[in-house]
C-alpha cells in the first residue's frame, strides 16, 4: 500500500512511534517554550519505555514558520503535538496569546489544553504521557489526518501580520 500521510491510515501497523511537536515560535512565545520543555521531560521517560517494548521512536520539532509549512502539516493551533500524524487533543480550545500577537502585530489565539476538566496553557506532564500512550496503543480511536484541510483564519492572520510586520515582500516564502 502507498503512503498518503504521516498518520499511517493505509499501512499495516508497525512498531513505530512518530511524535511531532508543531509550534509557531520557540524563541519568544512562553506557551510554546514551556510546552516544549514539558514534552521533552515526558519523551525522556517514554522513549526508553517504548524502546524496551520494541518500538522505534522518532521525535521531531517543527516550526510552523510559514503558512506553506502549516498547510503541509495540517496545522490547526499552536502548539500542537501529533503522534503518528494525529493531534493528541480531541478538540481545539484557544485563548489570547500575547507573545504570538506581538510577533505578528495582530490578535492571535493559541491552544489551551483541556485535561481532567481544567484548562492549561502549558499541558501537564501526566496529560501528555497519557495522550501519547493512548495514541499509540488505542488503535480503534485512530483518526486519519490526510483528509480535507484549510489553514484556520486565526493562523492566516498570524502569518499575514508577521509578513507585514517584517516588511517582507517575498510572498510569504521566507517568513
Image (cartoon, rainbow, N blue to C red):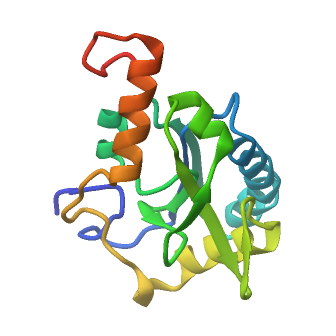
Above-or-below relation of 18 to 64: below
Q: Residue at x 37, y 11 (%)?
A: 168
Q: Is residue 148 left or right of residue 13?
A: left
Residue 95 pos. (x, y %): 60, 61
> Does residue 125 appear left or right of residue 50 in this picture?
right
Which of the two residues, 165 or 144, is positioned nearer the viewer here? 165
Q: On the rendered image, what quadrant is the C terminus found in?
A: top left
Residue toward you, 97 or 27? 97
Whether residue 155 is visible to the viewer of this picture, yes or no, is: yes
Count of numbered marks: 0
* Foreground of the two, 161 or 138: 161
The answer to whether one can see residue 17 in this image is no
Q: Quadrant of the N terminus?
A: bottom left
* Quadrant of residue 121 within the rendered picture: bottom right
Tell me residue 19's x, y (percent).
56, 55
Relative vertical location of residue 123 with respect to residue 36 in this rendering, above or below: below
**Residue at position x 29%, y 10% in the image:** 169
Taking the spot 79% from the left edge, 46% from the top edge, the residue there is: 37
Residue 97: give x, y in percent of width and height. 63, 48
Q: Is residue 158 left or right of residue 21?
A: left
Please give left or right for residue 42 compared with residue 171 in the image. right
Q: Residue at x 70, y 80 (%)?
A: 115
Amino acid at each position: 500500500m502507498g503512503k498518503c500521510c504521516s498518520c499511517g491510515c493505509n499501512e499495516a501497523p508497525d512498531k513505530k512511534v512518530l511524535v511531532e511537536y508543531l509550534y509557531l515560535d520557540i524563541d519568544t512565545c512562553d506557551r510554546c517554550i514551556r510546552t516544549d520543555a514539558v514534552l521533552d521531560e515526558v519523551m525522556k521517560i517514554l522513549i526508553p519505555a517504548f524502546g524496551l517494548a520494541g518500538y522505534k521512536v522518532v521525535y521531531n520539532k517543527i516550526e510552523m514558520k510559514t503558512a506553506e509549512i502549516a498547510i503541509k502539516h495540517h496545522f490547526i493551533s499552536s502548539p500542537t503535538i501529533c503522534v503518528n500524524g494525529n493531534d493528541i487533543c480531541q478538540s481545539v480550545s484557544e485563548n489570547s496569546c500575547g507573545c504570538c500577537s506581538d510577533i505578528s502585530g495582530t490578535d492571535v489565539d493559541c491552544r489551551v489544553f483541556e485535561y481532567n476538566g481544567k484548562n492549561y496553557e502549558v499541558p501537564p506532564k501526566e496529560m501528555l504521557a497519557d495522550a501519547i500512550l493512548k495514541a499509540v496503543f488505542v488503535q480503534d480511536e485512530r483518526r486519519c489526518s490526510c483528509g480535507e484541510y484549510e489553514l484556520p483564519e486565526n493562523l492566516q492572520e498570524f502569518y499575514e501580520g508577521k509578513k507585514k510586520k517584517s516588511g517582507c515582500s517575498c510572498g510569504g516564502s521566507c517568513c
